Image (spheres, rainbow, N blue to C red):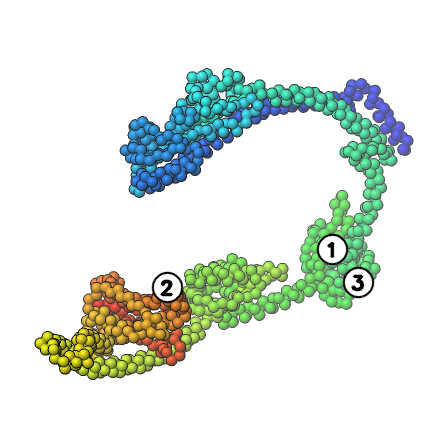
Amino acid sequence: MQNQRNDRALPIAKSSPSHPWRRFLSIAHQLRYGLIFLVLLSLLPTGGLLIYLSFQAQIQQSRSLQQARSQTAAGQIDNYLDDLKRKLSYLARVKGLTNFQPQAQQSLLEGLTRHNDAYEAVAILNRKGQLVASVSPYEPLKLENPATSPLFIRAFKQQEDYVSPVEINPQTNQPTTIMAVPIRNERDEVDGVLLAEINLNFLWFIVSQTQVGKTGYVYVVDERNFLIAQKDSNPETFQLQDLSKRPFFQFLKASADTKRLNVYPGLNQVEVLGASALVRSVNWNVVVELPTAEAYAPVYQMLSVMGGSLGVVTIVAVGIGFLFIRQIVVPLQRLTTAATELSAGQLETRVNIDSQNELGTLAIAFNNMATQLEELIKAVEVERNFVSAILEIAGALVVVLDPQGQIVRFNRACEQTTDYSFSEVKGRYIWDLFQDSDLAIQAKTGFESLKAGKFPQQYEGTWMSKDRQLRLIAWSDTALVDDQGQIEYIIKTGIDITQRKQAEEELKASEQRLSFLFRQTALAVVEWDLNFQVTAWNPAAEQIFGYTATEAIGHHPAELIVPAPARKIVDQIMNELLMQSQGIYSVNENFTKDGKTIICEWFNTPLVGDGGKILGVASLALDITERKQAEAALRQAKEEAEVALKTLQQTQAQLIQAEKMSGLGQLVAGVAHEINNPVNFIYGNLSHAADYTQNLLNLIQLYQQTYPSNTQIQEKIEEFELDYISEDLPKILTSMKVGADRIRQIVLSLRNFSRLDEAEMKPVDIHEGIDSTLMILQNRLKPNPDHPPIEIVKEYGDLPLVECYAGQLNQVFMNLLANAIDALENYDNQRSPKDIQKNPSRITIRTKLVTNETQPGSSKNVVIQVQDNGPGMTETVRPQVFNPFFTTKPTGKGTGLGLSISYQIVVEQHGGLLQCFSQPHQGAEFIIEIPVLQSRAVAIVGK
């Protein structure tokens, strides 16, 4: 048989070379000739196109290089001129430059010229065009009729910067130009012109630094088309040239208008590749020209190299192509022969190809085909065993029946569930395994329906095990049919769901219990989904919030029970619940349906699924409004009791202090009265005593003149030192008068301070009360061995008589001034003598009259400011200074009631303000503000 197959295959393999036309059209020849055609078709056009594109790219690169050179040079010139103009503009922005002193103007101009050597001369013209200042290292700047020149007209009248045409400076023989910028005064008006003559030597530096090949050059043309700079020329001997009428320049301007680079006869009448760039700040042009002989030399060299390379590449590609085609054609012929033999039935045919390419892979695949046929038969058997193993270890019940209903496969899961072994049930009918007759009839009826073609079927059925235990099975039955549609096997797969059913029953019972609790509990139970829309709403929630379950379910809490101020906090709590597995406790205000505000305790817990994923949120709420109200009432009662106790203590302290001040006032008034009578007696007789003494001295002098020779009288005169007595006795009387005046002032100050005769509210002089207080405190203001003096600075305003309780107000002045003196004395004890001398202690008293716009009728108020330069107060101490019993003084030196009583006197008794302003190391300032007329203020305070 094998020989017959080879005989049939060989004639087919030998007959193909007998046809020349078929041989010519074989794949081998098509590959050879096609390769040559493809090489020629791809390399020649592609190479020609590459040569053309390379030529164009090289030309464009040369043109772009020329353009870049011209733009670079133009940019350098533009930047240099902008820098010069910017420095001029900075100086011109100095307000009122034309009105400066000549020395100041000269100094500014010299500074500008020293900054840059390009400034040949700098000058200032006033608004009339007159030269007011100029600086130049050469001869002074000479301008003919500057007022009518374009420099002045453009800069002053048209208020714009101006650059003049380029000229040759007669002193330096170098090209220069003049820049002019307007000068503005304090009202931002043009008040003059700042001029600067610029040396253009920098143009030669820029054009000399611009490299344009070996034979190229650069030159600059101004706005008049004059040649103003050229590479390789001497600026000292350079002359301006007019290029506007030269043909090449007209061609260059036309090329610049179209933004193209062209070939044209250049400045030296040689064909060049040129480019120009505009210097925008002065409208000059920088021209770069490179002779075409140098510009195109690399292009021609590149063309020759690429042409030769293309020919060599073509020849090499054809030769290499033939070699590669041979590596394809020979294996392909072997594969063709082997395929012919294989189609003739020679399955042992093999192909020996050593190539590592796709043909080698194809040969290996061909050689494996015969081997795979044998291995395929073995694999089928292995697959069958594998399926049997899967049926045995599967967790589901698998029963395979033949068309008569007999068991042909009974897997291990069936054995474990029914307690039957496969050997016990093999060949038995499936319904014989059911010990209950009803179950057996159901099994047989199901089998008959499957045979009738009603498959697949899915149902739940009961199977009684060998030990007569009922198991609930979820069955899925199907049938395997042959090509004629006849049933070959019936496959029954099932899952034991007995335990799952039991769990479902238990879950149902648990749900019933939870449902009972949900309906009967006094707590509001609310469930939310992940969007925080209500999904469950129990009767207690209906009773607390007033919404029925139908009204609440599907709504967000912000729409129902959350007030607007609490929405931000509620949203934050909700977001935290979705990010953690723990619950959150909160107390919130909520709205009821009827608009009533209640307070609820919320216990919020996320509902977490089996995989740890949050499914929603469950919340328990309890209305604690009544409890909160009781707590608030208790708290309010406690606060009221504390306020009453504090008020009682404060009132008691004030009564004690008022009684002390009343006794002190009576004592001071009594002492003042008792001192006043003898002092008035002494003071009233001092003038008479002085007159009498003077008369006696005159009489003695007359006796001396009348009896000059009386020896006894002369002896007594010398014994009593009459000359000294005559000189010193008037001084003694004058000193006694001064002392008596001092005692009278002290007595008057004590009476003014006590004001026993002015206990009722009446108009008084505020300044008199302040001066009386200072008089009483004078002893503490004077220097002594323990502390330096304290300076009093009075800045009194013009005040009218003020309606007030004079005695009480004097008490306020005494408290404020005494506290200031205490603070300064304590501060001086902590400072060195050098610090005290540098910043002596000082108390400043200011008074002024102000208008109070906040009260009806714009009433007048009096402001008294008491300010010291002591240590000041911290932010902790300052808010407490008016609190009763608060003091920073050592124990025994202060009661803490002075400022508290002062505050009540000013605020409650006079309807005014008492404020304290202080910072550490900045001193302290107390400000008293009371109305001039007290009747309106007291009425307002009472109200």
Q: CA distance from mark 1 to mark 2?
A: 112 Å
What type is the residue that disc 1 sits on? Lys
Q: Name the mark nearer the viewer: 3 or 2.
A: 2
What type is the residue that disc 2 sits on? Lys
User: Could you say where residue 754 lies in the image, as x and y percent from the top left?
Assistant: 23, 78
Q: CA distance from mark 1 to mark 3?
A: 16 Å
Q: Are marks 3 and 2 in contact (CB under 8 Å)?
A: no
Q: Secondary structure at mark 2?
A: helix
User: Could you say where residue 348 lies in the image, as x and y percent from the top left?
Assistant: 87, 35
For residue 430, which numbered disc appears in the image? none
Work out whether 503 lies above or below 36.
Answer: below
- Which residue was labeled with disc 3? 420
Q: Is residue 36 left or right of residue 560?
A: right
User: Could you say where residue 28 lies in the image, as x and y percent from the top left?
Assistant: 78, 24
Residue pictured at 47% horizontal, 26% vertical: 286
Q: Secondary structure at mark 3?
A: loop
Dot 2 alpha-carbon crowd within 10 angstroms: few under 14, some 14 to 19, many 20 or more: few
Q: Are marks 1 and 2 in contact (CB under 8 Å)?
A: no
Quarter of the image for residue 748 reads bottom left
- Which residue was labeled with disc 2? 838
- Which residue was labeled with disc 1? 492
